[in-house]
């Protein structure tokens, strides 16, 4: 039962039922009230019509109207006798549900009462002024006209007929209202089901995607409504999720492949050394080979750990004002021995520039770009490093005089384990992760990294980072 109540469709149905019940009830009460008021107005018109006829009889004479004349006319209404002929056309004595009449003289003594008048009808309180009023009492509607001499008449009518009509109307309203409410509930249930059907489709698709069918997407029929826009956002999220999972799978496959080579080298060399007794120099050669393979594994593992740290902290960069010029200068100093070993000359043009960033990861950007430029050009080449400000950004530019990069390689340079020359990269001990690390760090700093190159013209890598204080 609790699960049913928590259903969106049932909640919509309950709210719809309550609101519809309130509206139908209000309409039925309004109709009943209007019908009741209309019947009272009809009775009031009838009573006033009788009152005017009675008053004309009491006040009709040839001379001026005086209290004495009215008093005399009232006295002529004998209680024991029948009603005067002139009024018989108005009052049907003895018939229930028809108007009745009671008259009093100036002393409050009853001088006339029609046969169907109730015994409980008494004159109102004394007053020196003439007045008239309506009242409803004990199921009767009564009109009183009191004259200046305190004489008066009352015209009334039983409301039994009107009550019966209202009772029949009440039953009709209950039946019609109940029927409308039932139809409304059926229609509301159908509309609620139709309204949440897209949600069920979305939930079903998301469930299938969660179970492993990453290629499935939500069918979007209408992108202009809220559910259409939600479906579009979810599809975009699923696209990014599938892309991330595909990259993760590719990354694991590539990492496994990269690690398999040095592991195989170590395994083969150790097996070769254990097969028979060898000369010390042969053992030394085997150990040198294992050392190189182990060093390559260490470099690869460190690069993988660096990428994992960047991915794991992509949303929590603790930035502070950093001296990009100083960081670049220190990194160049550390790489000069490597450059000299390859007969590469490093030039620098470093303008004072500060950035908002992580002082622990920014040196990796400089080191990877400069070492990449050193390794990918022949001896005697030149690497130029520049730091400057442009359009509110700090710019790090690393260019080389190497052979350049073909255009078809440029879109993939920052992919993990990507090499333009796979054979040379593996032989040189390069993991293909240096530029991927650069991009991951720059992305964390909300910056951009790009490359411009053409065969035979070298390459220019440009990193743009937000300046400190901007």
Image (cartoon, grey):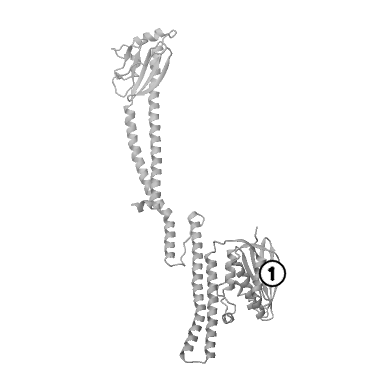
Left or right of 394 on screen, residue 85: left
The crowd level at tag 1 (other Cα within 10 Å; few <14, some 14-19, many 20+) is: some
Residue at image point 47% right, 87% down: 271
Q: Which of the 4 image quarters holds residue 325? A: bottom right
Above or below residue 171? Residue 276 is below
Residue at image point 42% right, 64% down: 208
Q: Residue furthest front?
A: 280
Pinpoint residue 413: horizontal percent, then vertical percent: 59, 73
- Residue placed most toward the observer, 426 or 202: 426
- Residue placed most toward the observer, 126 or 465: 465
Left or right of 417 on screen, residue 461: right
Pinpoint residue 240: horizontal percent, then vertical percent: 51, 65
Task: Let me know if residue 222 appears in the view.
Answer: no
Task: Let me know if residue 182 appears in the view.
Answer: yes
Left or right of 367 on screen, residue 219: left
- Residue placed most toward the observer, 243 or 76: 243
Above or below residue 195? Residue 238 is below
- Tell me the residue that label 1 is attached to: 386
Q: Which of the 4 image quarters holds residue 405? A: bottom right
């Amino acid at each position: 039962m609790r699960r049913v109540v928590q259903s969106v469709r049932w909640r919509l149905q309950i709210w719809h039922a309550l609101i519809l019940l309130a509206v139908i009830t209000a309409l039925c009460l309004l109709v009943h009230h209007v019908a009741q008021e209309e019947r009272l107005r009809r009775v009031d018109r009838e009573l006033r019509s009788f009152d005017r006829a009675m008053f004309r009889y009491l006040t009709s004479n040839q001379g001026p109207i005086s209290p004495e004349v009215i008093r005399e006319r009232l006295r002529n209404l004998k209680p024991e006798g029948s009603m005067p002929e002139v009024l018989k056309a108005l009052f049907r004595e003895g018939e229930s549900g028809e108007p009745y009449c009671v008259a009093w003289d100036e002393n409050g003594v009853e001088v006339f009462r029609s046969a169907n008048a109730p015994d409980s009808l008494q004159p109102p309180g004394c007053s020196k002024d003439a007045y008239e009023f309506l009242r409803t009492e004990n199921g009767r509607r009564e009109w009183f006209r009191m004259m200046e001499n305190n004489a008066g008449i009352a015209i009334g009518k039983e409301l039994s007929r009107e009550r019966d009509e209202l009772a029949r109307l009440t039953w009709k309203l209950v039946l019609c209202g109940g029927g409308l409410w039932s139809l409304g509930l059926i229609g509301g249930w159908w509309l609620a089901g139709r309204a949440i059907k897209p949600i069920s489709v979305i939930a079903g698709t998301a469930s299938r995607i969660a179970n492993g069918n990453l290629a499935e997407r939500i069918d979007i029929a209408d992108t202009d409504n809220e559910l259409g826009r939600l479906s579009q956002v979810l599809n975009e999220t699923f696209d990014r999720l599938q892309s991330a999972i595909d990259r993760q799978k590719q990354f694991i496959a590539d990492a496994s492949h990269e690690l398999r080579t040095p592991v195989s080298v170590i395994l083969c060399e150790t097996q070769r050394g254990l097969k028979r007794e060898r000369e010390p120099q042969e053992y030394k050669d085997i150990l040198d080979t294992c050392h190189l393979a182990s060093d390559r594994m260490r470099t690869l593992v460190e690069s993988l750990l660096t990428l994992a740290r960047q991915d794991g902290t992509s949303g929590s960069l603790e930035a502070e004002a950093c001296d990009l010029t100083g960081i670049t200068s220190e990194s160049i100093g550390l790489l000069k021995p490597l450059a000299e070993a390859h007969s590469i000359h490093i030039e620098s043009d470093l303008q004072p520039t500060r950035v908002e960033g992580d002082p622990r990861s920014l040196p990796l950007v400089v080191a990877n770009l400069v070492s990449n430029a050193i390794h990918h050009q022949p001896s005697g080449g030149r690497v130029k490093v520049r730091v400057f400000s442009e359009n509110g950004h700090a710019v790090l530019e690393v260019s080389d005089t190497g052979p350049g990069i073909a255009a078809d390689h440029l879109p993939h340079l920052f992919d993990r384990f990507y090499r333009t020359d796979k054979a040379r990269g593996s032989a040189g001990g390069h993991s293909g992760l240096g530029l991927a690390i650069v991009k991951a760090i720059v992305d964390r700093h909300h910056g951009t990294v790009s490359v411009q190159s053409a065969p035979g013209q070298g390459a220019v890598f440009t990193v743009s980072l937000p300046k400190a204080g901007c």
